[in-house]
Image: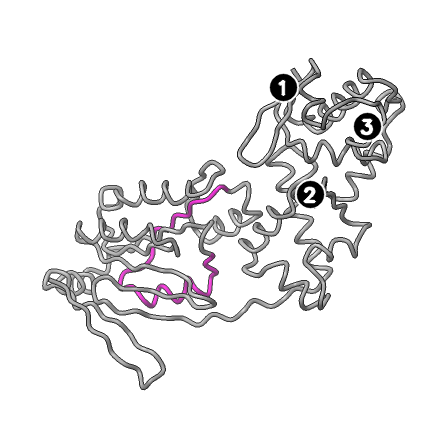
Amino acid sequence: MSYAKTTELNGSGSITQVQPTEAEETLVCYSFAHPTETAVLLLDAENLQINSETEKFLTTVCTCPIQIKIAFANWCSMGKLDVELHGRGYDLIHVPVGKDNADGKMITFGSSIYERYPKAREVLVCSSDKVMTNLCNHLRQHGLIVYQVSQQGEDITVLNSATGQLVRKCTNIPEIPAIAQFIQQIKELIKTEQACNHSHWVKLATISQNYKNKYTISITQVAEKHFPGKKSREIFEQYPAEFVLHQVDSDAPVYITLFEIVTDKANITEHQKITIKSKADLEQAIKNIIYKLTNNSPGSYIDIGPLSSEFKQQYGKPITEQIKGLQLSGNFIKFLRSCSSYQLKQTAKSWQIAVK
């Protein structure tokens, strides 16, 4: 039976060691004696970022060469991370958008590692999610040495399940990019998100998360260096020739798009931008905007946030103001429900609309 032992490090910290069973000690020796056996690296790319330097560090922790590397994520929301990981020899497994989807797929896949890869003797489970503990225990029970790789602050920690040794690697905070480089990085992320969601307007919160996932620093850190005292969204307000922000009200999400797209919208022909004098005119104007925003995927649903933003860009006023100007009762949702041209559905966070 394994038992815990803590070693003090001269007051600077401690390493907790779980004393291995006799079978586990035999397995460690067996790995050294059979160099042809391999280690498998499983990476929850939505939860933990591993650069090439950290990867080299992991090769010094395990005893077998890391010959199989598999990453799990919804790659549409990860910028060009899929290209980078593929170039470093990872097999990429795509999961649908949604919290914990990457976790679930990684657990399901990882639970049968010993069947998929008979020569695997060690597995590096790379995720800071505690839910992965069950996967690690499952693999241990099937005779594999498991390394739990996680991040604590700026440090990468590796727990060896066979020896109980906890190894920490201090990571350097990535260098903050020059503002010109940062703007280009953000523009690439916006274009990627636009292509994935078939919408010109994307949530700023999504871009912020994607940026942190890809570059391991936050937009807030960039703002602190180049614009001390300003909020992260104010970076984009400093560059109106590059970005356009829109927020329906103070409690609504902030949306962002590229100015080049808005410029194209400014060149709308007269038959596309109709004069709104009645409810029917407003209904047709909204329908035209939906057609434009779903040009790459006709008939699909879009959030009403981007729809409101696009209406304001085209007609110079919020859609709620236009409704009041026509002396129509009720709010925006009530108006849309009263129209026969649309289909509405409510999600956990917003309303979505499509043309019938």
Near mark 2 (Cα within 10 A), the count class, few <14, some 14-19 or many ≥20, is many
Near mark 1 (Cα within 10 A), the count class, few <14, some 14-19 or many ≥20, is some
Q: Tell me which amino acid carries mark 2.
A: Tyr
Q: Quadrant of residue 156?
A: bottom left
- Depth order, front residue of 53/203: 203
Q: Residue furthest bottom?
A: 10
Q: Quadrant of residue 105?
A: top left
**Left or right: where 216 falls relative to 296:** left
From which residue to which does the magenta span run? 49-74
Q: Dot 1 corresponds to which residue? A: 343
Q: Dot 2 corresponds to which residue? A: 255
**Left or right: where 202 falls relative to 144:** right
- Depth order, front residue of 326/265: 326
Magenta highlight on residue 73: yes
Residue 240 higher or lower than 3, as above or below: above
Q: Secondary structure at mark 1?
A: strand
- Pinpoint residue 320: horizontal percent, then vertical percent: 77, 31
Residue at image position (47%, 70%) is 171
- Pinpoint residue 348: horizontal percent, then vertical percent: 53, 34
- Depth order, front residue of 307/149: 307
Q: Dot 3 corresponds to which residue? A: 324
Residue 63 higher or lower than 212, as above or below: below
* Mark nearer the N terminus (3 vs 2): 2
Q: Quadrant of the N terminus?
A: bottom left
